[in-house]
Amino acid sequence: MAIIRNTLAKKAVFEIIQGNKTAMSQTEIFAKVNNICDRVTVYRILERLVKEVKIHKIVNINGVINYAPCDACSHEQHVHHDHLHFSCTTCKKLTCIADNHIELNIPSNYQVAEVFLTVSGICPDCVIMA
Amino acid sequence: MAIIRNTLAKKAVFEIIQGNKTAMSQTEIFAKVNNICDRVTVYRILERLVKEVKIHKIVNINGVINYAPCDACSHEQHVHHDHLHFSCTTCKKLTCIADNHIELNIPSNYQVAEVFLTVSGICPDCVIMA
DNA sequence: TACAATTATGCAACATTGTTGCGTTAATAA
DNA sequence: TTATTAACGCAACAATGTTGCATAATTGTA
């Protein structure tokens, strides 16, 4: 059950997320959707796309939830992820950076599911400006 | 300028944060403050305590901002932090885990400031329940 | 192509979280 | 004890996210 439908709004939202090289918040996505659908619909579409593993959630260091296409940072449910997220303190953009293998040292009574690694700082675009 | 005052409410908030072994959100702190002060005051006290480096902010994987005393996970502004945060998906508690040194592989045109490392999973208390 | 089943949407209403302005209270130095 | 001004309470607002329900639209099937 639960047949997945590919609606206009869903396609639009997905294309917006795919077309952006940095992760976007619900607010940014809704702004780009150009009133093709309601605010609430964007929330529901994002929820569905996450469940379908077409996009995924990333929390920025300020607590804002961002969405990125899953190919941008291919995520498998490993203990040792192979990418990190760079959060620019100037332009607030969140970017995926690949090739980062980390080793963890967590007590064995903790059951690890996923690793979230975010680095704050200034991205190349903003470094140039400064 | 800016003389720091040690008010009753501020002391109470700080003691609540110190007395808890896991990080707490504003909502949780306000619930424990027992109407000694206003909701807004808690926000302002937290802001001040962060500025005074007596507590610090940690963003949970769901985007909720939590506060922990600064001794719980001594943080210096290093590129290579020495601790991580464990976010329990069952009880939602955020715990500091020390002794985690990681090496990063970030392009040199990125200017790194801080590293945020959070691991999700099930904490010892909740593993026992399951 | 038309129809039925049900997924997806819009809208209104609400909940939560966080912010701001301003008059008042209270902590601290003198 | 008093003056200074940091801190507070309250009201109002803003942003973000959620829920219920009637309606619209997609998709498999006849």
Image: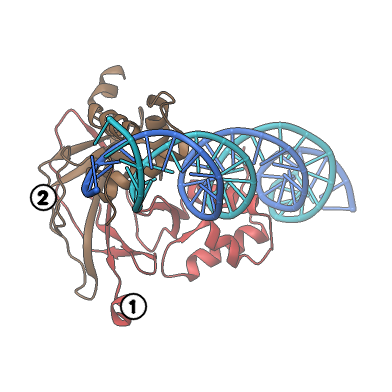
Chain colours: A brown, B red, C cyan, D blue
Q: Position of residue B40 (x, y in %)?
A: 64, 49
Name the kind of residue labelled 1 in the image: Asp
Q: Which residue is mark 2?
A: A101
Vertical placement of A96 versus A12: above or below? below
Asked which quadrant contains residue A5, the reply is top left
Q: Which residue is mark 1?
A: B125
- The chain letter under disc 1 is B
- The numbered dot on residue B31 is none
Within 10 Å of the Cα at label 2, are there few (<14), some (14-19), or many (20+) other Cα atoms?
Answer: some
Query: In the image, what residue occupies the spot 40% across and 37% down?
Result: A26
Q: Position of residue B80 (x, y in %)?
A: 21, 49
Vertical placement of A109 versus A130: above or below? below
Left or right, D4 with respect to A100, comes to right
Q: Secondary structure at mark 2?
A: loop
Query: In the image, what residue occupies the spot 32% across and 50% down?
Result: B76
- The chain letter under disc 2 is A
Can you see residue B5? no
Vertical placement of B82 versus C29: above or below? below
Please state which of residues A64 and A86 is positioned toward the viewer in this rendering.
A64
Mark 2, mark 1: which one is toward the viewer? Answer: 1
Number of numbered discs on residues: 2
Q: Position of residue B57 (x, y in %)?
A: 43, 51
Tell me whether the residue at label 2 lies in contact with that at label 1, contact meaning CB atoms closer than 8 angstroms. no
Left or right, B67 with respect to B98, comes to right
Please state which of residues B92 and A1 is positioned toward the viewer in this rendering.
A1
Q: Secondary structure at mark 1?
A: helix
* Picture quarter with the N terminus of chain B: top right
